Image (cartoon, helix red, strand yellow):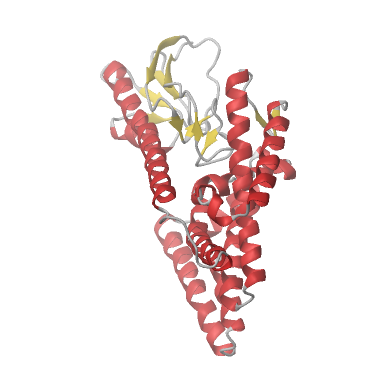
Amino acid sequence: MTLIPLLLTYSILRKRGVGWWVLYLAIPVAVLGSYQWTTQHLYGRGLLLDAASYATESKSEISKFPIAKGFIAFVFTGGCIAPVLLFCRRLWSRAAIVCGLLFAVTAALVLNHASKLGSFSLPSIQTTHLLLAIQLSLWGTVGVSLIILAVLDLVHQPDTESLFLFMWIIGTFLFAGFINWTANGRSVLPMIVPAGIIIVRRLEQQAEQRGNKTSSAPFAPLLIAAVLAFAVAWADTAFAETARTGAMNAHESYGTRKTVWFLGHWGFQYYMQELGGKPVDVNEFRPTIGDVVVVPETNTNLFAMPAGWPVRRIFEIPTTTWISTMNYQLGAGFYADVFGPLPFAIGPVPPERFTIFEVAP
């Protein structure tokens, strides 16, 4: 979404004439138009305009709180681009680092005494609440520092390349935090490329100011960043695996004896339908007495079952023990901030729970 204005601005600043920026603009417009036409032909509805409509009509509840929404945008930015934190000693002066620590500590104290962040209810358990407050303040501060780095890069070297990088970062930030229906890690990821370039440029500037006297090669920050990235990927993989295991357990328990309905989407829907499960359509749900409905704990489009339907079974699938990408109790919501204001959360991760209800009169 940010590619069109970036290419347009860049070509104008390069003074290549009207023909060049029209060409640059026409290429992505043609790709988007082709996507809209193709999906309209295949599915009977254009997915590009559908996505735009969904983004404008299905804003998350947090979007009603602009200050909280802005802070969460900084949190997702900082958490998804952790090298900004890991290189902080090389990127900033001691005074700047102290200011950042004071901001983070203040934010943590405020969040630790708050009951909500926008529409998201912070945990009632004090230790979990404090842990979440610390992570929110840390990554929020890192996100702010990245935006400041982009501004400083443009001020230090006001050329077309710096402006291009600045607009790339700011455009992605605004889309991910305020235009899209929800803040999520995937929307922030396009910012990684310009952020990496700006980090390197800043490191070079700092080295020049110190008379080219640099410390050892930055192997430690890069190694820590790699370990963190693999840990988050491992946690996301483990979460996805719980959907498959949960679907298989439900099928093994009831698939050969009853009609198995289910709520939720994502990978859980894929595995349930692959095993013969039927998705619940709220407009056309016609179960038979004795059928069962499987309800996952962490998923989307869930609703309460009728009070008279007995719970036949509750089973839990263990996931990672200390890091999670999707967990409401820890505040992790990598794919949507409605599940949590963090792209990933560190803490004791509870197992994923699946509840099986039996349809009763």
- Residue at point 58% right, 61% down? 169
Q: Nearer the viewer, residue 181 or 228?
A: 228
Would you place residue 197 above or below residue 178 in this image? below
Q: Nearer the viewer, residue 356 or 162?
A: 162
Q: Position of residue 171 (x, y in %)?
A: 61, 62
Q: Nearer the viewer, residue 251 or 337?
A: 337
- Residue at point 30% right, 30% down? 276
Tell me where residue 182 sits by quadrant.
top right
Would you place residue 119 above or below residue 28 in this image? above
Viewport quadrant of the N terminus: bottom right
Q: Position of residue 264 (x, y in %)?
A: 46, 32
Q: In the picture provided, is 205 more to the left or to the right than 269?
A: right
Q: Nearer the viewer, residue 284 or 357?
A: 357
Q: Position of residue 130 (x, y in %)?
A: 62, 25
Would you place residue 215 above or below residue 331 in this image? below
Viewer can see residue 33: yes
Would you place residue 68 above or below residue 91 in this image? above
